[in-house]
Amino acid sequence: MLRNSRFDLADIETERKVIIEELNMCFDSPQGRVEMLIDEVIWPDQPLGRDIAGSKDSVATIDRPAIIEYVTGNYVPNNIVVSVAGDIRHSEVVDSVAQTLGDLPTMEPPQWLPANNSQDNVRFVTEKRKTEQAHLCLAVRGISHSHPDRFVLDLLNLILGEGMSSRLFLEIRERLGLAYDVHSHTNHFHDSGSVNIYAGVDPKRIEDAIEAILNELMKLKEMPVPEAEITKVKELGKGRLMLRMEDTRSVAGWIGGQELLLDRIRTVDEVVSILESVSSENIQQVAQDIFKKDGLCFVMVGPSRKEKGLEKLLSL
C-alpha cells in the first residue's frame, strides 16, 4: 500500500465522491458542523484551522499528479516511524523493515507551518439553522503536546467536563437540566492546542447555558480544587492509561506517536509519576493561564438569536 499503490484514476474518482459525501454528512450534522467551525475560529486563515477532510472545492480539484507528489515527498525514511508491539523480537522487525523499506530514497520532507496563536478579543461566530437544539462550542487556546503542563491540563479537563462525574455534567445536566450532552476535551498539537466545551441546549436557554459554563471556568480560576476531587481524577486518568496499554495496537500507537512527535518515549510509569505529582495549585495556575476573556472563542449552530446579547456574556 505504501510503496506500490496504483492510484488508478477510476479509484480516485470513487474516493473523491466518498469524501464529498463525508463532508456533506458533517455539514448536515449540527454537532459535527460546530466542531468544524470552532477550529476555523481558533486558528483562522491557517492550516491548523482547516478541516482535515478538506473542502468540496479542494477535494474536487485534487488530481493524480498532486497525490503522487504528496506521497513521494512525505512518505520518506526520515519522516517515517515504524512502531510494532506484540510477541515479537526486535531483530525480526528490523530485518523485515529493512527488506521492505530499506531502499526508499531519502528526501527532505516539507516543513510544518507554525501556528499563529495571537488573539486580542473574543471571537464569535454563529450559523443559523432551523434545529430543535442550539449547538454551542466554547473554546480557549490550550497548550502543545510537549508543554510541561500538558498533563496538568488533561487532569483539569477531567475535572471540568470529561465523564459523568465531571463538573459540567453534574451542574449543566444534572442540577440545571440545561443539556443532555455536555462535555469538554483537550487537543494537543505541535505548537498549539485547545480546550473545547460542547453543549446541545434548548434555544430559549442559550444564555443560561453560557453563564453556567463560564461560571465553572471561573471556579477553577478562583478556587483551589479539593484534594478529594484531585485524587479521584488522578485515579481515573491512571486507570484509563493502564487499560489502554492492555491493547497492543494502543501500545504501538503510544510508542510510535511519541517517537515521531517528541523524539523520545515516555514510559507509562513516567506518566503515572507526573500525574501523581500534580497539585491543586498547579491546576489552578493552568486555569488562570488559559481561561482568559481575550482568548475565548465561541461558535453556535442553531436558531437565530441576538448575537450582541450573547457576545456580551462571554467574559471571564
Image (spheres, rainbow, N blue to C red):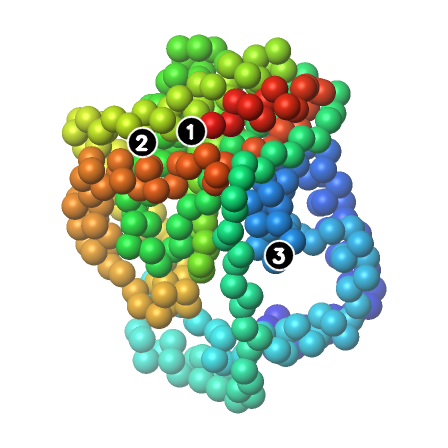
Q: Earlier in the sequence, mark 2 or mark 1?
A: 2
Instruction: Decide if residue 277 is on the left or right side of residue 262.
Output: left
Q: Earlier in the sequence, mark 3 or mark 1?
A: 3
The residue that mark 2 highlights is 221
Q: Residue 290, relative to residue 307: is it above or below?
A: below
Q: Report x, y in % for residue 48.
A: 57, 55
Q: Mark 2 touching mark 3, by CB under 8 A? A: no
Q: Residue at x 65, y 53 (%)?
A: 45
- The reply to whether the C-beta atoms of the residues labelled 2 and 1 are less than 8 Å apart is yes
- Which quadrant would the C terminus be assigned to in this image? top left
Q: Quadrant of residue 240?
A: top left
Residue 59 located left or right of residue 169: right
Q: Position of residue 143 (x, y in %)?
A: 40, 50
Name the residue rendered at 64%, 23% in the picture: 308
Mark identifier at residue 46: 3
Q: Residues within 10 Å of mark 3 (few under 14, many from 20)?
A: few
Q: Amino acid at mark 1?
A: Leu
Q: CA distance from mark 2 to mark 1?
A: 9 Å
Q: In the rendered image of this protein, does residue 149 appear above or below residue 310?
A: below
Q: Residue furthest front?
A: 120
Q: CA distance from mark 3 to mark 1?
A: 27 Å
User: Residue at horizontal 48%, vertical 39%?
Assistant: 294
User: Which type of secondary structure does the marked residue at label 3 adopt?
Assistant: loop
